[in-house]
Amino acid sequence: MKVGIDATLLGIWVDVTGINMALDIGTGSGVIAMLLASRGVPEIDAIDIDRLSISESNENFIKSPFSKQLHAHHQSLEAFGKHQSKKFDLIVSNPPFFDHHFLATDERINNARHTRTLTHSDLIQISKTLLMDEGRLCVVLPYSVSVNFKLEAQKNEFFLRRQLLVFPKRGLPPNRINMEFSLDPSLPCHHELLTIREEDETYSSQFKEFVSGFYLE
């Protein structure tokens, strides 16, 4: 699976202050988990239902400077949740977001992008059982499906604490949103904006500053 900007921005944006144990759901190549490790999270479990993705992420973990912090598991979220005794203070995910429409010919891509192997309801409900009381759930989704995700989160007593609207180009509407949910209803919600490209297709100064220290160029 290619390293996408959605996962990269989420891994950079997530607040890791005070985080000791994190879980990356649907890790793919492992980029989010490695970003969290590079930012100081001491222990990160990364799971994926796709065997080839876990092989790739495990190889990346071993070759990285953060190998002792990272643990890859070839498991579905449902299976991981049933057999997991420890609790996490952060769960991150770049989850499937299409609802069975426009299926590709590659089954691995379908499983990664479509909710047939991991519904948003399952993601929210199982994450709640795996989180500490003060824990947080962070996801990146297309802006068009974020309203339904927020409603599903509210049903399970997850409250929006922070969000980042991502605009692909100045003048265009947002196409992605990073969201952070907490189980504490008393916390205020912080709203942030990020524009990736200017109208002339060059990267914005805001985007360059955002990814500074993580991208090679």
Image (cartoon, grey):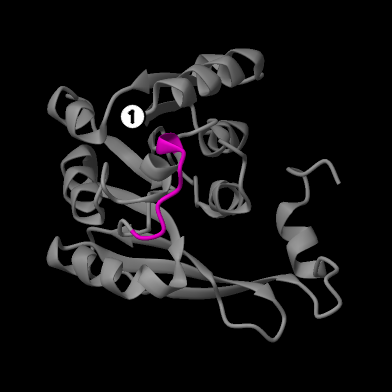
Q: Image check: 138 left or right of 165?
A: left
Q: 145 or 44: which is nearer to us?
A: 145
Residue at 53%, 31% in the rendered image: 30
Q: Image check: 180 left or right of 193?
A: left
**Number of numbered discs:** 1
Q: 176 or 87: which is nearer to us?
A: 176
Residue at 26%, 47% in the rendered image: 116
Residue at 43%, 35% in the rendered image: 108
Q: Quadrant of the N terminus?
A: top right
> Callout 1: few (<14), some (14-19), or many (20+) C-alpha neighbours within 10 Å?
many
State whether the magenta stretch is mostly helix, strand or loop. Answer: loop
Q: Position of residue 175 (x, y in %)?
A: 54, 71
Does 160 sit above or below residue 110?
A: below
Q: Amino acid under label 1? A: Ile
Q: Position of residue 118 (x, y in %)?
A: 27, 45
**Residue 126 colored in magenta in the image:** no
Picture quadrant of residue 205: bottom right
Does 198 sit above or below residue 57?
A: below
Q: Position of residue 142 (x, y in %)?
A: 46, 66
Q: Which residue is mark 1?
A: 49
Secondary structure of the residue carrying numbered label 1: loop
Picture quadrant of residue 72: top left
Q: Image check: 210 left or right of 59?
A: right
Return the residue found at the far bottom. 171
Return the residue found at the far front. 105
Picture quadrant of residue 199: bottom right
Start-end of magenta stretch: 101-108
Q: Position of residue 15 (x, y in %)?
A: 50, 52
Q: Image check: 49 left or right of 190?
A: left
